[in-house]
Amino acid sequence: EALANATSAATSGDKSAQRRHTSPLAGQVWALSQDPQGCREVQRAIEAAVDDEAKAAIANELRGRVFEALRCPHANYVLQKCIINMRPQAIQFVVDELQARSGLAAQAARHKYG
């Protein structure tokens, strides 16, 4: 259903409605990202997002959870999808969180999902 909403917004000709459109997954991204089917839904929503703002709205729900996400067998794919599909400025929080504590980036690099 969430993907259908994102897709219909992407194909809609009403640009002002698209700008007002927030992520159909608002408030659910982290919970969905930890689930095998949910993480696929979030990844599709990132790909179907109409603009950078819509993608950022999805990614922002991972703020504060980057290290946890990269260690999760499902959420790590969502994090990767954000990194691949978003502008560097929009995902700077990923780098910032990994640099926040000494050794965290090295742990992430060594982790099997990181």
Image (cartoon, rainbow, N blue to C red):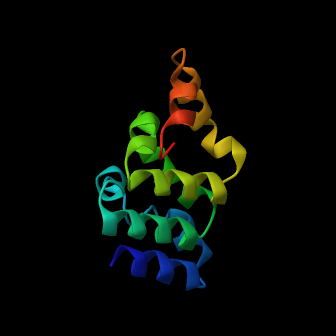
Q: Residue at x 31, y 56 (%)?
A: 28
Find the residue positioned furthest to the top: 102
Residue drawn at the location 28% of the way across and 53% of the way down:
31
Q: Position of residue 39 (x, y in %)?
A: 38, 62
The residue depicted at 32 percent of the width and 64 percent of the height is: 36
- Number of numbered callouts drawn: 0
58 versus 49 height, above or below: above
- Write down the quadrant of residue 50 in the picture: bottom right
Q: Position of residue 71 (x, y in %)?
A: 41, 41
Q: Residue 62 appears in which quarter of the rendering?
A: top left
Image coords of residue 37 (percent x, y): 32, 69
**If the image is split into quadrants, where does the N terminus sit?**
bottom left
In the displayed structure, 7 sits above or below 73; it is below
Q: Which residue shows up at 65% across the image and 57% down it?
A: 84
**Image location of residue 102, percent across then percent down:** 54, 14
Q: Nearer the viewer, residue 7 or 14?
A: 7
Quick one: 74 or 46, which is closer to the camera?
74
Residue sitting at the far right: 88
Left or right, 18 with reference to 40: right
Is residue 56 shown to the viewer in this render?
A: no
Indicate whether 58 appears above or below 21. above
Task: Evaluate whether residue 106 shows in this view.
Answer: yes
